[in-house]
Image (tube, rainbow, N blue to C red):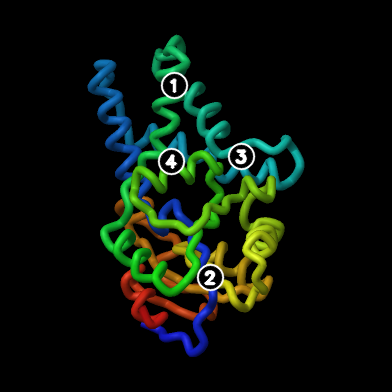
Amino acid sequence: MTALMTPPVALLFDTYGTLVDWRSSVLDDLARFGDATGRQQDWARFLADWKACYRGGMDAVNRGERPWTTVDALYRERLVELLAAIGLGNMRRGDVDHLTRAWWRLRPWPDVVAGLGRLRRRYLISPLSNASFAGMVHLAKFAGLPWDCVLTAENARCYKPRPEVYRTALALLGLPADEVMMVAAHNYDLAAAQALGLRTAFIPRPLEHGPGQTTDLAPEGKWDVIVNDVQELAAALGC
């Protein structure tokens, strides 16, 4: 655990992977869907194909190749294609919407809710996620994430790691960069935030992508704080 000399005023958290276990949560949703529809499927492969649209879709928005599109819409587009490929192209709209919103029903890692509660007693805390605003609000309710406010890429109409996302968060909080810390399990996110003067904290989540994960297993930059979980972050920041 790395301690920080001068604490920040506010903490911004990446959420998918850093705070919530999206993979096992969505896999469970898909398994229930399979049971309900009588489908025997390699749901881990299905999820990998589904998740693959995430970065590519966001990058297309960031490059100006498509207009602003929420992550929810990106996931729904790809889900419709994948369902058609397994013979479920005629599902009712409401059922497709419900399955898409599996990304709103993600379980937090065991350390998260208590750790955020400790931090909130001293700091302003908010997500800064590539999720939609609606998705992040519903996820907070489902997972019990005790935010002071909700900030997402939707506020900036582009996606991390574009600098506009971090600058928009700073503007909405009314704080200078050096009074805000970005907390993430992804080195690219911290590098983008650090380039704009934000403080940084790295929390590895070696099981985010399941067994055999090869990315973000260790810090790849000179981050201000390196801890194992949110409870350790709270301790490092004097909570």
Q: Are marks 4 and 3 in contact (CB under 8 Å)?
A: no
Sooner in the amino-acid sequence: mark 1 or mark 3: 3
- Circle 2 residue: 10
Q: Residues within 10 Å of mark 1 (few under 14, many from 20)?
A: some
Where's residue 135, x and y in %? 49, 40
Under tag 1, what secondary structure? helix
* Along the line of sight, the residue nearer the viewer: 120 or 110: 120
Disc 3 marks a residue whose amino acid type is Gly
* Along the line of sight, the residue nearer the viewer: 210 or 227: 227
Residue ID at (26%, 59%): 110
Q: Is residue 143 above or below residue 14?
A: above
- Circle 1 residue: 96
Q: Residues within 10 Å of mark 4 (few under 14, many from 20)?
A: some
Sooner in the amino-acid sequence: mark 4 or mark 1: 1
Q: Are marks 3 and 2 in contact (CB under 8 Å)?
A: no
Where's residue 39, x and y in %? 28, 19
- Circle 3 residue: 57
Disc 1 marks a residue whose amino acid type is Val
Q: Are marks 1 and 3 in contact (CB under 8 Å)?
A: no
- Circle 4 residue: 138
Q: CA distance from mark 2 to mark 4?
A: 22 Å
Q: Is residue 39 above or below residue 215?
A: above
Residue ID at (55%, 68%): 190
